Image (cartoon, helix red, strand yellow):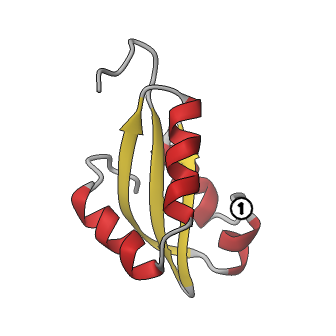
Amino acid sequence: MSLSSSSPWYVYLLECQRGTYVGITNNIAKRYRAHCTGKGARYTRANPPTALLGAQPFEDRAAASRAEYQLKQQTPVQKRRWAMCWPHAIEVD
């Protein structure tokens, strides 16, 4: 996969107080801060994230959305296994 010159989109996995959350973004640090401050998704407002488990880059939003859908179909164990293959290299704090 070759990433285009524009910012890549990412599929990311959060460990939350009760479970996991899968999402997409083109700015992981900003999106993670939004989740942590209660301005993210409804699920993360009720179950704040405790860690960013992993993120994988994609060429565009469409590819990231397809991958997000596939990851959301997995069990929590499979999601965490996926995250171990794609450790994030982005500081989010």
Q: Position of residue 32 (x, y in %)?
A: 52, 55
Residue farthest along the top direction in this orientation: 5
17 left or right, relative to 41: left
Residue ID at (41%, 70%): 79
- Tell me the quarter of the image containing the C terminus: bottom left
Count of numbered circles in the view: 1
Within 10 Å of the Cα at label 1, are there few (<14), some (14-19), or many (20+) other Cα atoms? some
SS for dot 1: loop
- Front residue of 93/85: it is 85
Above or below — where is 14 with respect to 66? Answer: below
Quadrant where the N terminus sits is: top left
- Could you say which quadrant of the image residue 62 lies in? top right
- Dividing the picture into quadrants, the one containing residue 72 is bottom right
Depth check: give the residue in front, 77 or 47: 77
Lateral position of residue 62 relative to residue 5, left or right: right
Q: Is residue 67 positioned above or below 70 on the image? A: above
**Horizontal and vertical percent for residue 25?**
55, 42
**Residue at far bottom of view:** 18
- Residue 19 image point, x, y percent: 54, 83
Q: Residue at x 44, y 28 (%)?
A: 8
User: Is the residue 30 above or below the residue 6 in the image?
Assistant: below
Q: Which residue matches tag 1?
A: 41
